[in-house]
Each structure stands twice: as structure tokens, then as C-alpha cells.
Amino acid sequence: MYKFFEKLRSYCEVEEFKGWDPFDGLNSKVLRTILPLKHSAILRLIVIQLFKRNPVNLRKVLLVPKQYNAKGIGLFLQGYCNLLKMVTEDSEREKEFGNKEELLQKVYFLADLLLELRSEGYHGSCWGYNFDWQSRRLFLFPAYCPTVVATSFCASALFEAYELTKKEKYLEVALDSANFILKDLHLDEYKGERMISYSPLHGNDLVSNASLLGSKVLAYCYKYTGNEEFLQVARSSVMACCKGQNEDGSWTYSQIPPKLWIDSFHTGYNLDGLIAYEEQTGDKTFHENIEKGFDFYIKNFFLEDGSPKYYHNKQYPIDIHCPGQLFVTLHRLHKYEEYGWLAEKVLRWTIEHMQDQKGFFYYQLKKGISSKIPYMRWSNAFMFYAMSYYLLNNKQ
């Protein structure tokens, strides 16, 4: 599998980690000039969906620039940290991934870039996306408006970079993200506990994966500081999300309509947040929830031939996050020894069906015509990150 990872790595490095995104249509220099996008939420939504759903790439002709995306850079940083750990632990792997000093320089570059990409005007370190985004409920998320999901991926990578480099500035910025969560986000009541909101703009979304990724950050911050407030808020969020877990171990995306679907990779995010909370705080109260959640995840989102499913009850569209998150989840939950055979099968299927000859991965496969546009954050950064976890657990 190494050669397929290297094809992806080569593509991303040649592109200098910049690229397009499924949701970046409002960055079009042409459409921003000729359409009244500032004044029409419906028009903004139409533009975003046109770019997202169209299998023909309109970005070149309509002048959507390739840019850095903070979450994408966080994913790349975590991936390079994983490679650095591999060659540090086994110098023989330098033949595959490059020498330790080269990888260390990549970690420095990406971590420093992540510091530059922080969103400004908030109480703590935080990150958003490099484009305006109009939701289907007609909420406008301006470019660089931070979210707890993007912040969690970025802060987690900086914690890892600190552990490998011992550069204090990475730790300081990662720890500062707790101030963003506690002072800028909403803590919404749910079943007597508090869930962490997705963004500063809107509360009461009750999205489990957002709340649990916020708990993950606070748990890491608690580990380094011993701050009891971090622990209390993280635990309340975990308790709320576990109260919202279904009897079969699944979670709906949100606790409120209409977002009541059950999907693959957000379930993986939930498990990631829970295991991080348990390991960083030592609180094993919710271990049964983790096991029940993993049991549902592993039994409902993968078919016999290794193909992944998006929903528990429906396969399409197959999103690249669906296979990718498996490798992360197995690593985080220490399940590779038991389920390495599944990881192998799913990765082979994914490479065969979703990796382009140029090295990049496709965004989604649909029953009809699928988009083969290379999206840096959504597809390639995520698969770089995901495959690095596969490689951590496989030496062939």
C-alpha cells in the first residue's frame, strides 16, 4: 500500500497543500463580480450546490483560487507527525518515507502555517474555513468563522507536533483553544448536561460529533494544565452525548430534527472524542458507550467486499471519509489487531475505486455520474491523514 500513499503524498506536495473544496463556490472571482451574492442567501446556496454537485469542474473558468484550508493543514500536520513517529521508532522506514530531518522540517512548516491560519477576533485559538459557506437552513458562515470541528483537528495536530518537537509555541496555541470553546461557543443544555455548539454563531444545534470533538480538546488541555473547569465541561459534554446515544450504540447526527440520520464517519468522530476523553482524563465511566458505539460502527458501515456505506441503512453516496475514518478509528480504539483484515480489505477497495491515476482521491461515488474533482481538504488531506494511521499499524 506504500506506493499508493506515496502517489497521494507526491500529488499533495506538488500542489503545496493548496487546493479546491466542495464548498468553495462563493470564492469565485467572476461570480462575486456579476452576482449580488452579498444580498441573497438563496443565490449563495444555489452557487454552492452548483459547484458541489457538478461533476464538471467550474472552478478554473470561474476563477476559484486554490488556497490553504486550515483543517486540511491540520490533517496534513497530523499525517506528517505520524510519519515522523514511524521513522523515529524504526530508522529502516526512512527508506520509505524520507529521513527524520526532512520529515521534521515538514512538521515545522505545517505547524507554523497553522499558527498563521488562526481566525482572529476570538478569545482563544481557533480555526475556520477559507470560504463563505451558506447552509441549507440559510445560515451564513463567513470565511474564517471558526468551528469546533476544525479547531479540534488543528489543536490535536499541534499537541502532537509539540510532543515530537518540544516547541512550546505549539503547546501554547493548542492550549489556548480551550478559551475559544469556553468563551466563544455555546454550551447548550441537553438532558441536564451541556453540549458544545458547532460554531459561535448558532447554539442549540446539539450535534454530537461537534460536542465530543470539543470534549477531546478540553481533555487534552486538562491533561497538560490540570484545570478542573476543562474537565468539568468536557465531562458534561461526554455525559450529554452518551445520554443521546441510541440503545443499539448508534448516534443520530444531531439530537433535533431534521438532522436525525446515522452515518459512518461522524460515528467515527464520536468514538474519537470519547476515547480521547477517557485516555487523557483517566475517567473510564463511559467505556461501555465506546464499546457499544464501536460495535454498531463496525457491523453497520462496511460490506463484505470492503466497500463502505455512508448511512447505516443506505450505501450511497460513498464519501471518501467513510473508508478513511475506519483506519483512524481502529488506531484510536486500539482495534487493529482484531480488525486489521477489514482495514486491508477496505483500503484495497478504496484505492481501486476512489484513487485517481494522478494520486488524488475522489470526493464521492454515486450511483450515477460521480465527481472526480481533486478536493484538497475533503479528499486528499483526509486520506493522507487516514492512510498514515494505516501505515502506523502496518509495516509491509
Image: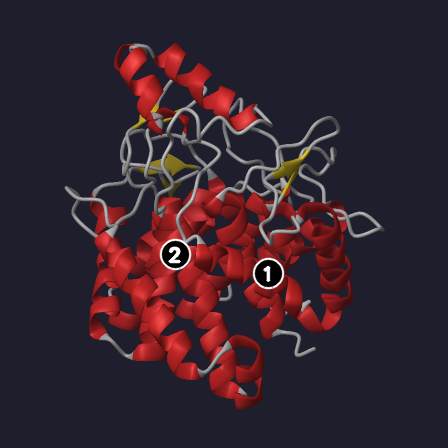
Q: Which residue is label 1 attached to?
A: 7
The residue positioned 40% from the left and 11% from the top of the image is 42
Q: Is residue 388 left or right of residue 212?
A: right
Q: Secondary structure at mark 1?
A: helix
Is residue 118 rendered to the left or right of residue 314?
A: left
Tag count: 2
For the residues labelled 1 and 2, the Cα–Cα distance comes to: 20 Å
N-terminal of the pair, mark 1 or mark 2, is 1
Work out which residue is located at the far front of the displayed protein and give it.
Answer: 61
Where 91 sits versus 70, above or below? below
Pick the front one: 183 or 23: 23
Instruction: Bin the neighbour count of mark 2 within 10 Å (Cα to Cα): few under 14, some 14-19, many 20 and up.
Output: many
Q: Quadrant of residue 261?
A: top right
x and y percentages locating residue 95 in the rendered image: 56, 83
Q: Quadrant of the N terminus?
A: bottom right
Where is residue 205 drawn, in percent x and y? 41, 31
Residue 236 appears in view? no
Q: Residue furthest bottom?
A: 91
In the image, 293 versus 373, the foreground residue is: 373
Q: Is residue 251 above or below residue 323?
A: above
Give the quarter of the image for residue 369: top right
The disc labelled 2 sits on which kind of residue? Gly
Which amino acid does the dot numbered 1 rest on?
A: Lys
For disc 2, the marked residue is 74
Q: Decide: few, some or many residues near mark 1? Use Cα within 10 Å; few <14, some 14-19, many ≥20.
A: some
Q: Residue at x 35, y 13 (%)?
A: 41
185 sits to left or right of 58: left
Display colour scheme: secondary structure
Pinpoint residue 345: horizontal percent, then vertical percent. Answer: 78, 59
From the top left corner, tell me how far across and down residue 341 is, in percent: 78, 66
Query: Is label 2 in a helix, a strand or a loop?
Result: helix
